[in-house]
Amino acid sequence: MNHFASNTDKTLLIAIAQDESLAQAVRDMATTIANIQHFPNDEGKEPMALIISDESTPEPGEALAGIIANFMHRVGDEDKANLLAMF
């Protein structure tokens, strides 16, 4: 993703964000990504910080929330490598 999600991606992300069968953290991540305009807004960074600080968050979720919170125009090369290794 560069700068912001495509319309197709936003549609999918909104569907994820509205799916009450999913964990709230997953829904929050989808909402934050859908709203990225070059970088996440403060409303998106707050739930990412909560996910990261929650001791019950598994390591991959914590790492993904950190990558989302630190998004600046695109995902950095190191974060891309970490994503590939995790998923």
Image (spheres, rainbow, N blue to C red):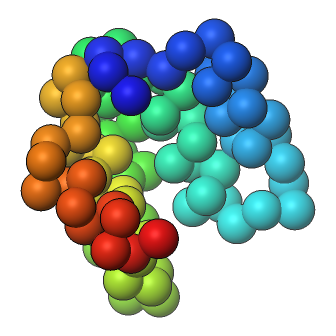
Q: How many marks?
A: 0
**In the image, residue 76 above or below residue 7:** below
The x and y percentages for residue 54 are 39, 78
Looking at the rendered image, the quarter that the N terminus falls into is top left
Q: Residue at x 68, y 18 (%)?
A: 8
- Give whichever of 71, 42 is nearer the camera: 71
Left/right placement of residue 23 relative to residue 32 reads right
In this orientation, does residue 56 appear?
Answer: yes
**In the image, residue 38 above or below residue 63:** above
Dividing the picture into quarters, in which one does residue 70 lie? top left
- Give whichever of 78, 53 is nearer the camera: 78
Q: Residue at x 33, y 46 (%)?
A: 68
Left/right placement of residue 8 relative to residue 49 reads right
Q: Residue at x 32, y 29 (%)?
A: 40
Left/right placement of residue 44 relative to residue 30 reads left
Q: Residue at x 47, y 71 (%)?
A: 87
In this orientation, does residue 41 appear?
Answer: no
Dividing the picture into quarters, in which one does residue 26 lie? bottom right
- Give whichever of 18, 9 is nearer the camera: 9
The x and y percentages for residue 81 are 22, 61
The x and y percentages for residue 13 are 66, 34
The x and y percentages for residue 38 are 27, 16
Left/right placement of residue 21 relative to residue 26 reads right
